[in-house]
């Protein structure tokens, strides 16, 4: 796929541009927060000598002109240095260390569940009668209308506390992962199911479907070899959105289920005005978005052979 | 609830007016709750009664009572004011910001367009909830700030839509004709561009209100929005969470309230969407 590979540098440049913008935004946020950073570092009600305040100022590099601080922050970021927490006095990377794995584990499980739900629901209902389809679209509507964190609360109330089916909280094995991942997955699965079903329905009405049927291909062959491939395209396009939903959802899911992870760290940081931690997490989410979109761009020609020769790639 | 959803789903599919009408009715009821909650419930939402704490639904308290003996039904009805102000207010802010930026980008020349669009690209790379959390970190917590944060986070989505629609109109023949006739640019925007942008914008804003209502309650749930003892759905969910093991009703009913609003605006939005696409001659 030389055509696709030729596009990579341009996509990379666009991604770097977005990240540079995100870093600038993070820098702005850092300096727009009203009040003295030194007070935040010291914590409420702590008195300090002017000498100590000056020391903190120097430690965080706050004495330099803004332009110098900005360039230094960009340089640090380029080296993978995410800054230093106000509250803990530690490098942000150290604060996030150990919190990444639980969130990634949750997000990956939720993605798998969401895809499973979406494709299962779509395959079971596409091309079916009116009753099945309206039932499915009603359930999809419900799935996207229910706040996922409330779903988690309901799950805890009824599945864990009332009937004792699943563990209530903590991070102990696959059973404890199931309920959080499911609550995170349902709204995403609802959106995807709708998209996949529409695509399956549309694809099965196209001439190529008629050709497959005329050749004596079964509906199963048509689905597995042809129409599902069509349905995979819009799902790939939505990947960036999925990543965003997972990260936003993780903030709430981890809080509801008292799970460790980046979401919990973010909530704590927002509450205590630990801006470097907040900006680092927001930057990381933007980076994840950029990387996923880049991968999706590369995956399009794999999914859809028609895009292999087209030099311009696909408009998203 | 699922029966309602089923009816709603079928209605949205067939274009039957039943589901949208039902949705409008639910929203009208909530509008009454916002404007005059006293008309719907008699009980004081803040009156505590420790003797009657955590009573299950029934009798004088159809939705039960919370840990301080406050009437949950009354708090759900009164909570509409804060919850819906945040949700609808944030959407209004997002739409206003989106209109401004989108129109500016579309009609202000290439340079400006490029600049606005590159900024949008950056902002669209952030999940909306994280962007809102970043804004809350900067401006601080509280109901008003949460409204602003969610509204700001929604701006890029609307700006992108407005710009796209506006560009189509601006490049059309009749705008060229208007320009040739000497009609000034601002008047063109008001007379020709705005009416064409309004339809799709209304559809997106209606569906988007579902998202902002959920985000608003989510931020309050995280303790960043309405402060206790104010009645607000997200905050009530957060309180009720402490008593899940013993009192399911405290966290169930505020959630149902959120779902009823989100479901209604989504059904209504999809109905409007279906009507506008049919109007353009598409299936």
Image (cartoon, coloured by chain):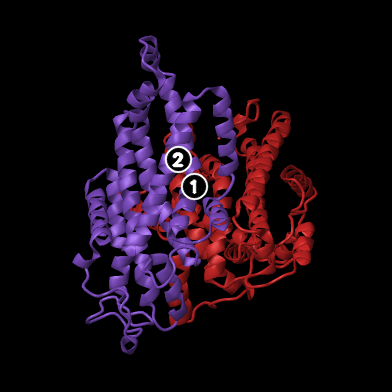
Chain colours: A red, B purple
Residue closest to the far front:
A50
Tell me the subunit letter for badge 2: B
Q: Is residue B155 left or right of residue B179?
A: right
Kindly identify the residue that appears in the image at 65 percent across and 51 percent down: A31
> For the residues marked 2 and 1, what is the alpha-carbon distance in whole angstroms?
8 Å
Kindly identify the residue that appears in the image at 48 percent across and 61 percent down: B219
Residue closest to the far top:
B180
In the picture shown, does residue B188 fall above or below A245?
above
Circles 2 and 1: CB atoms closer than 8 Å: yes
In the image, residue B270 lies at what x, y percent?
34, 44
Kindly identify which residue carries mark 2. Answer: B97
Kindly identify which residue carries mark 1. Answer: B152
In the image, residue B150 lies at what x, y percent?
47, 52
Q: Is residue B261 visible?
A: yes
Quadrant of the image containing the N terminus of chain B:
bottom left
Whichever of labels 2 and 1 marks the residue nearer the N terminus, that label is 2
Q: Is residue A129 visible?
A: no
Kindly identify the residue that appears in the image at 49 percent across and 57 percent down: A117
Residue closest to the far left:
B39
Q: Are marks 2 and 1 on the same chain?
A: yes
Tell me the subunit letter for badge 1: B
Q: In front here: B272 or A52? A: A52
In the image, residue B282 lies at what x, y percent?
34, 31
- Residue B190's label in the rendered image is none
């Amino acid at each position: 796929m030389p055509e696709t590979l030729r596009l990579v540098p341009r996509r990379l440049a666009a991604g770097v541009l977005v990240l540079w913008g995100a870093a600038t935004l993070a820098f702005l946020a850092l300096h727009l927060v009203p009040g003295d950073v030194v007070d935040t570092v010291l914590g409420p009600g702590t008195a300090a000598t002017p000498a100590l305040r000056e020391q903190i100022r120097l430690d965080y590099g706050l004495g330099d002109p803004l332009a110098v601080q900005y360039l230094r922050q960009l340089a640090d970021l380029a080296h993978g240095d995410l800054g230093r927490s106000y509250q803990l006095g530690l490098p942000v990377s150290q604060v996030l260390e150990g919190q990444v794995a639980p969130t990634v584990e949750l997000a990956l499980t939720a993605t798998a569940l969401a895809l499973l739900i979406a494709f299962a629901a779509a395959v079971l209902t596409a091309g079916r009668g009116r009753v099945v389809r309206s039932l499915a679209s009603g359930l999809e509507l419900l799935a996207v209308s229910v706040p996922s964190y409330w779903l988690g609360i309901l799950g805890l109330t009824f599945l864990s506390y009332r009937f004792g089916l699943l563990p209530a909280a903590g991070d102990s094995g696959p059973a404890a992962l199931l309920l959080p991942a499911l609550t995170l997955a349902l709204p995403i699965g609802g959106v995807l199911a709708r998209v996949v079903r529409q695509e399956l329905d549309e694809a099965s009405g196209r001439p190529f479907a008629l050709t497959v049927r005329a050749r004596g291909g079964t509906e199963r062959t048509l689905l597995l070899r042809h129409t599902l491939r069509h349905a995979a395209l819009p799902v790939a396009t939505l990947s960036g959105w999925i990543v965003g939903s997972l990260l936003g959802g993780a903030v709430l899911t981890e809080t509801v289920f008292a799970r460790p992870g980046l979401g919990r760290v973010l909530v704590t940081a927002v509450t205590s005005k630990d801006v470097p931690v907040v900006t680092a997490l927001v930057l990381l989410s933007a980076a994840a978005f950029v990387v996923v979109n880049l991968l999706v761009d590369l995956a399009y020609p794999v999914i859809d052979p028609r895009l292999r020769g087209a030099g311009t790639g696909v408009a998203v | 609830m699922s029966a309602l959803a089923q009816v709603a789903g079928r209605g949205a599919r067939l274009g039957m007016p039943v589901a949208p009408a039902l949705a409008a009715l639910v929203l009208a009821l909530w509008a009454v709750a916002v404007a005059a909650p006293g008309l719907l419930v008699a009980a004081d939402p803040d009156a505590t009664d420790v003797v009657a704490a955590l009573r299950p639904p029934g009798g004088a308290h159809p939705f039960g009572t919370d840990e301080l003996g406050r009437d949950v039904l009354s708090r759900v009805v009164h909570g509409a004011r804060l919850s819906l102000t945040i949700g609808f207010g944030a959407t209004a802010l997002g739409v206003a910001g989106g209109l401004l930026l989108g129109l500016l980008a579309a009609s202000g020349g290439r340079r400006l367009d490029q600049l606005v669009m590159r900024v949008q690209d950056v902002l669209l790379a952030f999940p909306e909830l994280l962007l809102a959390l970043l804004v809350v970190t900067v401006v601080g917590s509280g109901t008003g700030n949460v409204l602003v944060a969610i509204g700001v986070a929604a701006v890029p989505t609307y700006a992108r839509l407005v710009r796209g629609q506006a560009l189509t109109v601006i490049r059309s023949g009749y705008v060229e004709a208007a320009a040739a006739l000497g009609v000034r640019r601002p008047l063109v925007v008001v007379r020709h561009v705005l009416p064409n942008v309004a339809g799709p914008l209304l559809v997106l804003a209606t569906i988007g209100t579902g998202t902002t209502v959920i985000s608003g309650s989510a931020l309050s749930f995280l303790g960043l929005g309405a402060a206790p003892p104010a009645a607000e759905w997200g905050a009530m969910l957060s309180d009720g969470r402490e008593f899940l093991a013993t009192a399911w009703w405290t966290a169930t009913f505020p959630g149902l309230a959120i779902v009823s609003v989100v479901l209604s605006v989504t059904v209504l939005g999809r109905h409007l969407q279906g009507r506008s696409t049919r109007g353009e001659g598409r299936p």
